[in-house]
Image (spheres, helix red, strand yellow):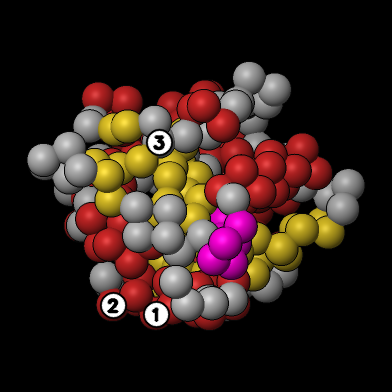
Amino acid sequence: MSYQSEAVLENNLVKQLQGLDYSGVTLNTEAAVLSNLKSQLEVFNGTVFSEKEFGSILNHLAKGNVFEKAKSLRGRFQLTLDNEESFYVRFFNSEERDKNLFQVTNQITQEGTYKNRYDVTLLVNGLPLVQIELKRRGLELKEAFKQINRYKRHSYWNNYGLFNFVQLFVISNGVDTKYFSNNPLPTLTFKQTFFWADTHNRNIKELSAFTNAFLDSAHSGKNAGKIHSSQRNP
């Protein structure tokens, strides 16, 4: 097994995802994440929001715990526009998934109890829905799992709690790759991580193969909503 650094794994993953129809975007700051969310929601909803209107959307998104945010993701928000008319804001299209806008970014910095930088983030319509934590080959997956738990404690609650919209986590050292859903701490344990399996129930462990099978933009939104009924192995 040849040595492969975390940086190489990360760069190769971003390039692969761009080849799977994710648009690459640089979002190194909280301000950039919010600006990108505004522009993506505008394109997705076919309109333009004023700063006041977008502030109302952010206040709506900030409410609730992880489970409540998952419900609001699939619902609509009745926004009162500046002209007093109502507009129903959509955040995700579950019926026609190809209508959603898929992006990939890396090294998002979040300020919280500590400054955290997230490896790779997949966004749908500007909202972070999949978080990927990578470790260099040879390190145990538990290290990546622990890192995500630290992120959740230290910084996920910041920036309007947008990262609590994450539906899935993926952890990998290049050789082994597992996924798990976003459950609240402290109930989340490593036993709740799973390998993805093919139609013959063979585990897909290598990161590149897992990405092709599980993170293709045509399927990742669908997978996020059905992992509990899909084929999986601990």
Question: Residue 203 appears in which quarter of the rendering?
Answer: top left
Which label belongs to residue 210? none
The reply to whether callout 2 and callout 1 are in contact (CB within 8 Å) is: yes
Which label belongs to residue 15? 1
Residue bearing the label numbered 2 = 19
Mark yes or no: residue 229 visible.
yes
**Residue 56, percent across and down?**
62, 43
**Residue 101, percent across and down?**
34, 62
Extent of the magenta region: 131-139
> In terms of sequence position, does the residue under pointer 2 or pointer 3 come before the other?
2
- For residue 31: magenta? no
- For residue 133: magenta? yes
Which residue shows up at 56% across the image and 32% down it?
Answer: 190
Which residue shows up at 60% across the image and 39% down it?
Answer: 164
In the image: residue 226, left or right of residue 112? left
In front of the other: 139 or 157: 139
**Residue sitting at the far left:** 200
Circle 3 — which element? loop
